[in-house]
Amino acid sequence: MNKQHFVVVFKSDKMGAGDDQLGSLLIKAYINTLVENNNKPAALVFYNAGVLLAAEESDTAIALRALEEQGVKLLLCGTCVEFYDIGQRLAAGTISNMYAISDTLSNTGYVVYP
């Protein structure tokens, strides 16, 4: 099935609820899979602890840079980046605001929350 226009939202640096170590492994695998997937999302949106995925020291930094190079827009909640104090350590993405995030989510066909 080909979803023409979808956005993936990362509201945590983990995938699912339960064991945090497993959640970290799952989110890394999901993002790495997006790099290889032929059907790319239009954008990735990161808020709350999800912004930590875009930090230089994150296991997902390389994959996120690759997605950005492949034309996927990465929007990071500016308030969240500031809260976690990672603005100087971002590996990928554009610091954004809730207006742009809201606009992106409301103008897409599908929103995916891994």
Image: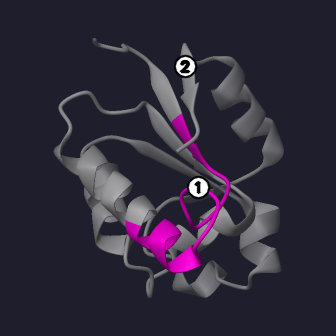
Q: Are marks 1 and 2 in contact (CB under 8 Å)?
A: no
Asked if residue 111 is positioned above or below residue 12 in the image, the reply reads: above
> Which residue occupies 50% across, 79% down?
21
**Where's residue 17, x and y in %?**
64, 59
The label number, if any, that marks residue 110 in the structure image: 2
Describe the element under mark 1 as helix, strand or loop.
Answer: loop
Q: Is residue 69 visible?
A: no
Q: Looking at the image, is 63 positioned above or below residue 105?
A: below
Residue type marked 1: Gly
Residue 76 seen from this side: yes
Q: What is the spatial separation of the Cα atoms under label 1 and label 2, in whole angstroms?
A: 19 Å
Query: For the magenta stretch, what is the residue range?
Result: 8-25
Placement of 36 over or under 76, stated as above or below: above
Residue shown at the point (29%, 13%) measured from the top left: 2
x and y, in percent, of residue 4 in the image: 36, 13
Q: Classify mark 2: residues with Cα within 10 Å, few (<14), some (14-19) or many (20+).
A: some
Check disc 1 and report the residue beneath it: 16
Q: Is residue 3 left or right of residue 96?
A: left
Q: Nearer the viewer, mark 1 or mark 2?
A: 1
Q: SS for tag 2?
A: strand
